[in-house]
Amino acid sequence: MKRAGLLLLLVAFIAFPQVFSNPAVTTVAVFTLLYAASATAWNIFSGFTGYIALGHAAYIGIGSYAMALMCQDWKVPAGYTPFLLVPIAGLVAAAFAVPLGWISLRTRKHTFVVITIAIFFIMQLMAFNLRSITNGSTGLSLPNPIWSGAFFNLPFYYVSLALLVLALGVAWWIRNSKYGLGLLAIRDDEDRALGLGVRTSQSKLIAFVISTFFVGMAGAVHAYFIGSIFPAAAFDPLFDVILALMVFLGGIGTLAGPILGALILEPAHQFFTLQFSQNGYYLIIYGALFLIIILLLPEGIIPTLRKYWIKGTTGRGGANNSHTRADAAKQGETLLADTTPRNDGANP
């Protein structure tokens, strides 16, 4: 039943742009799939290891600029050809993640969070100041696809969907592998995992690089979809907040949690941006929403629903067991009364 449900869900995703062909709707759908893939990738590292990273926006920016520079320097024509460069952009982001991850992962807890934020702002400043490469605040342009009308969003939609399926498949494989068990052991107690023989430093770095690889690919698709990139947009700190919010809302450490969080929050994000972007109220709304989720749903939607489901089924089972034990006790009392000799005075 689970496999059938996943297959039906995949069919629904494939058929969605054919049923809802409005370009405004499919545009939001493309952004939602890209965020779902990025949140799934973020969860591979932060959800499985317990290290909360708030600097993944640096790698989506690296992927975006890698895509733009390759298209510019290699004279890549518009159309389907730039999609072939998406894995290369992901590899570029992963290559940057190796030394940066090695540095940041030498720390833990709050120090790690601060270092990831610092690395993000360093990369953003480099994008502003390395004008000979990034063109500074002027930005870079990407090839403009010749597609038009309702068809324009379809290639981006299905590439984003393929990226999400690939990220989810890798997350599932890691979660059910021996390597994934080592990551979960690090999340529970890193020192004890190290004592049990888990190569904690190597395992964390591999998970970090895998995570940034998918985030870099999402950045490349996002840049091609938008058509131009700028340092402030490619290295956006709000991206990190949205990723963490999506994963925490759906359920950190789960496979379906990041996708559920993206399906809920990204359409809301688009709505808030359109309605309140001029006065910046949408940032206040995001901060309030983050606090509400942490206070009311600290485990996320999926773990909370699972807990209540188990409690409900266990409660019903416990009630049935209680009735069974009561009936057995009554039968035992009746049997004891029937087999006990009576003293009625006639037989002293």
Image (tube, rainbow, N blue to C red):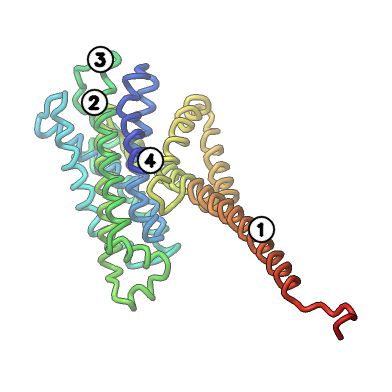
In this rendering, would 145 be left or right of 53?
Answer: left
Q: What residue lies at 28% left-to-right and 13% top-to-bottom?
A: 149
- First-in-chain label (3 vs 2): 3
Residue 93 position within the rendered picture, expressed as x and y whole percent measured from the top left: 23, 48
**Residue 236's disc number:** 4
Frontmost of labels 2 and 1 is 1
* CA–CA distance in space, label 1 to label 4: 59 Å
What kind of residue is marked 1?
His
Q: What residue lies at 32% left-to-right and 36% top-to-bottom?
A: 7
In this rendering, would 42 be left or right of 291?
Answer: left
Q: Secondary structure at mark 3?
A: loop
Above or below 143: residue 247? below
Residue 344 position within the rendered picture, expressed as x and y whole percent measured from the top left: 88, 77
- Write down the residue under mark 3: 148
* CA–CA distance in space, label 3 to label 1: 67 Å
Q: Residue furthest left?
A: 74
* Viewer-nearest residue: 15 or 210: 15
Do tag 4 and tag 3 residues touch (Cβ < 8 Å)?
A: no
**Residue 323's disc number:** 1
Q: Secondary structure at mark 4?
A: loop
Category of crowding for the residue at label 1, using alpha-carbon neighbours closer than 10 angstroms: few (below 14), some (14–19), many (at least 20): few
Q: Quadrant of the N terminus?
A: top left
Do tag 1 and tag 4 residues touch (Cβ < 8 Å)?
A: no
Frontmost of labels 4 and 3 is 3
Category of crowding for the residue at label 3, using alpha-carbon neighbours closer than 10 angstroms: few (below 14), some (14–19), many (at least 20): few
Q: Quadrant of the C terminus?
A: bottom right
- Write down the residue under mark 2: 155
* Viewer-nearest residue: 156 or 180: 180
